[in-house]
Image (cartoon, rainbow, N blue to C red):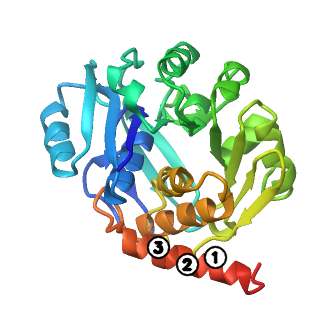
Amino acid sequence: MALIVAFGNPVYDDITTPYVTTGGRVLSGCSTNGCLALTRLGHQTTLVGGIGPDYHQRFLEDMQRYHVATRLQPSAQTGGFRLIYDAHGDRTLDLLGQADVITLVPDVCANAAAIIIGPVLQETPLQLIKRIRATSTAPLLLDPQGLLRRIGADGRVEHVANPEMHAIAPLCTVIKANEIEARVLTGIDPRQEPCKAVQQVRTLGCQIAIVTLAELGSIIDDGTRQYRIPAYTTLAHDSTGAGDTYMAGFLHAYLHNPADLFVAGCTGSATASIWIEHTGPDAPVTMAEVMRRTAILVSHHHNGGS
């Protein structure tokens, strides 16, 4: 059982898709979802972030129920978004609340097997990531989503370039970006030029770059070769958290065998596929089902599938 520490504010989101609606705000967040999935894969997880008094008690009860340890700093309010997905899977995000920038770097980082940086909205600036890196030599995995967002005048989330990324990337072992984030980071449309896009993400300075492409799978670049990872075909009832739980599955396999990035990617794809079949934090991610789906993806590749 590895200890994994994740930095990023938890959120309570209101989600509507063509298939489901949460009917109120539910627990989510990049690092939160990563911790939930990793805990279900047998790891010990600690979430570092800020929570407001409005959701403090509910959050503590949720984390206790899901067996995720926390290191919390008080915040004026709890973060959250209203997410509305259309029939094509595209979404709008409207701000419901924003928690404060994280300043806490707990001692537990020194014992971590890996650290995830998964911000939702600008709460993990360069100075924090430098402090985290100074406390630990463990692999640092970044999901840059929250570093590439700002709130527009209409209260809606916009994607923007972040000048700090050129200093942040060299501190990271892995950067995992979705197609929107990859386009913001590189100016390249990864659906048109996936190999070029992932290569450009890696040249920002990380050791391993991953670009996820929803139903088209993902692509990994370690500077020596590129790996095309197939998607596990399923019906996405709610794709919120797909990238977060891809990262969790990838990290689980990467810690087991850092040399086999193809299997790590397939494990990420398998984990995410379970998550998106459900909505909210209770997706039935189990080691057995993740391994079953991973084996199908790996077998398909070895048998000549694309």
Residue where numbered disc 3 is placed: 291
- Binning the other alpha carbons within 10 Å of mark 3 as few (below 14), some (14 to 19) or many (20 upward) gives some
Image location of residue 193, percent across then percent down: 86, 55
The reply to whether discs 3 and 2 touch (Cβ–Cβ < 8 Å) is: yes
At 56% from the left and 53% from the top, the residue drawn is 254
Query: Which residue is at 62% across, 60% downward?
Result: 265
Q: Quadrant of residue 275?
A: bottom left
232 vs 197: above or below: below
Q: Is residue 169 depicted above or below 43 in this figure?
A: above
* Mark-to-mark CA distance, 1 and 2: 5 Å
In the displayed structure, would residue 117 be above or below residue 253? Answer: above
Q: Which residue is mark 2?
A: 295
Q: Is residue 30 visible?
A: yes
- Amino acid type, mark 2: Ala
Of 301 and 3, nearer the camera is 3
Q: Please give the name of the residue rendered at 70% of the width and 26% of the height, measured from the top-left corner.
A: 170
Q: Position of residue 298 (x, y in %)?
A: 63, 76
Asked which secondary structure carries label 2, the reply is helix
Q: How far, Cα to Cα, is label 3 from label 1?
A: 10 Å
Mark 3 or mark 1: whose residue is earlier in sequence: 3
Q: Residue 298: give its label.
A: 1
Q: Quadrant of the C terminus?
A: bottom right
Kindly identify the amino acid type of the residue bearing the numbered disc 3. Answer: Met
